[in-house]
Image: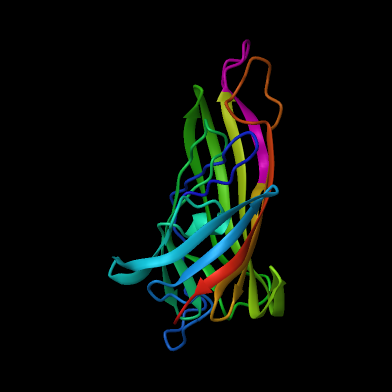
Amino acid sequence: MKIKLILSFAILSLLFSCSSDSSNGSDSSSQTNYFPLALRNYWKYRVVTNAVTQTDSLYISNDTTINTKVYKKFKTRNAPIGFFSNSMNKNAVRIDGYRLLLTGSIGFDFGAGLPINLSLSDYVIFQENATNNQDLGSVSGVINQTVANYPLVINYTLKSTNIESLPTFTSNGRVYTDVKKIKTVLNAKITTSLTVAGIPFPVVVSILDPQDVVTSYQYYSKTIGNVYTNTNINYRLNSLPTGITLPLPSSGSQTQEEFLQTYDVSN
């Protein structure tokens, strides 16, 4: 899945290689129905990005088997715009008791000159019986990549948390019941090593101090699925030494909302 959240000056892209799974919340005798996973289920979203309105159509296309386990494959009818539809597009999801597990790839564009990559294996995106502020899934790692002849070291953590349960939630003029609020955060740090005149060893320079680059909230309503997503992208690069330039915007800020318009689901 390719998350193309358009900034006014660039696109942000990341793809990590990691996996995360936990046995907590797994119960084969119970099945969550907060995201119905029947073939041909679909959800249509109105996507508002920095006051620009577009539309995403997300649906379940087919079954797929990964490591002997059967998943549901998600697709979008056109290139997705929203964070949530991008996160699901071309990825596979299965129910494991009270949990929803996602396997596939996820990406962001941190400026056109910095494509970075990530894959997820049974990453927990939702858990029905989680308590308030309970961590669901978390993956951390290091990516080494050369950009404009500079060796970049990117430290990242992707984390999902169950925030709270809501008896009712209103979005797009509709009232939903039995809603679970999930938070997803991408934290990143970027450094590079430079040769400085008069110093006999490379000097480590911080390009991006540890920051929550992406913060997204998803709202799941029982028997329906995700009904609303609010995503914010914010970052600011440090000032670089004289003569050092990178093909990256020095800062970025974007707000995006995804409102469920229509849906057709069955369990």
Can residue 22 be seen in the rendering of this structure? no
Q: In the figure, 236 relative to 233: above or below?
A: above
Q: In the figure, 108 relative to 130: above or below?
A: above
Pick the residue in front: 58 or 69.
Answer: 58
Q: Position of residue 7 (x, y in %)?
A: 63, 40
Asked whether residue 257 is drawn in magenta, I would say no
Q: Which residue is rendered at x = 52% and y = 42% of the image?
A: 13
**Region of the chain picked out in magenta, as a range:** 194-211
Q: Which residue is rendered at x = 50% and y = 52% of the image?
A: 80
Q: Which residue is rendered at x = 43% and y = 57% of the image?
A: 77
The image quadrant that residue 10 belongs to is top right
Q: Which residue is rendered at x = 54% and y = 81% of the image?
A: 223
Q: Is residue 95 left or right of residue 220?
A: left
The image quadrant that residue 230 belongs to is bottom right
Q: Position of residue 2 (x, y in %)?
A: 47, 49
Q: Position of residue 76 (x, y in %)?
A: 44, 58
Outermost residue on the top side: it is 198
